[in-house]
Image: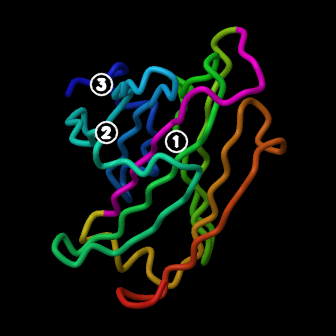
Amino acid sequence: MKPEIEQTAKGPVSENIRRLAKVEIGKTNISEAGYIPLVSSTNEYTLEQQHLILKPLTHFKYHSAGNCYVLNINVHVGDGYSIDPNNAVQCVTMGKNIMIFLNYAKAGESGNVPTAILNYRIEFDSDKTDKIRGKQILITTSSGDPEEGSGTQVIVEDEDEI
């Protein structure tokens, strides 16, 4: 699948998160049951609609076959919203915290009823799993002002206990 937005040296997936993980973002239109690949940090998009969990949920799992952690995030948005084409995913590491910011922008008029789901898949490479073990991953979604966003937290202990 070819993503809608090409990854460049500057964005939309920031360099900080690309050093830790492979990021793929897609968009599912609820009313049309259509799936659109938006961006891949490696420009090699592998995520398909059948791999998605289509409900508002953050799911974090260790995959022993690939020796990596995979974080799936689904954000319900109105039809006038899409990922920020300049800064879709940003990451800041501070001590025992890894803060991941998922930024989206209002592209047009939309109602209050969510009509689409932004699907984020963040795969922490096998050589990076030691860097995230024992850390708290804080996830914030925002449209415009980060203080108006909502957040969730994941604590990484080891392969068997998250």
The amino acid beneath tag 3 is: Pro
Asked if 61 appears above or below 6 in the picture, the reply is: below
User: How many angstroms separate mark 2 from mark 3 (CA)?
Assistant: 13 Å
For label 3, the SS is: loop
Q: Which residues are magenta?
A: 109-124
Q: Percent x, y for residue 3?
A: 30, 25
Q: Are marks 1 and 2 in contact (CB under 8 Å)?
A: no
Please provide percent x and percent y for residue 16: 46, 50
In primary-sequence order, the first of circles 1 and 3 is 3
Name the side, left or right, on which 41 lies relative to 2: right
Residue 42 in the image: above or below residue 72: above
Which one is in front in this view, the residue at disc 2 or the one at disc 3?
2
Q: Position of residue 100 (x, y in %)?
A: 58, 54
From this viewpoint, which residue is outermost toward the right? Answer: 148
Residue placed under numbered mark 3 in the picture: 3
Q: Amino acid at mark 1?
A: Val
Q: Is residue 157 above or below residue 141?
A: below
Label 1 or label 2, whichever comes before in sequence order: 2
Element carrying mark 2:
helix
Q: Say whether residue 17 is left or right of residue 106.
A: left
Provide residue 115's location: percent of width, then percent of height: 60, 26
Q: Residue at x 62, y 57 (%)?
A: 139
The residue to which callout 1 is attached is 89
| Residue with the mark numbered 2 | 49
Tell me how many marks there are: 3
Instruction: Compare marks 2 and 3 and give the one earlier in the sequence.
Output: 3
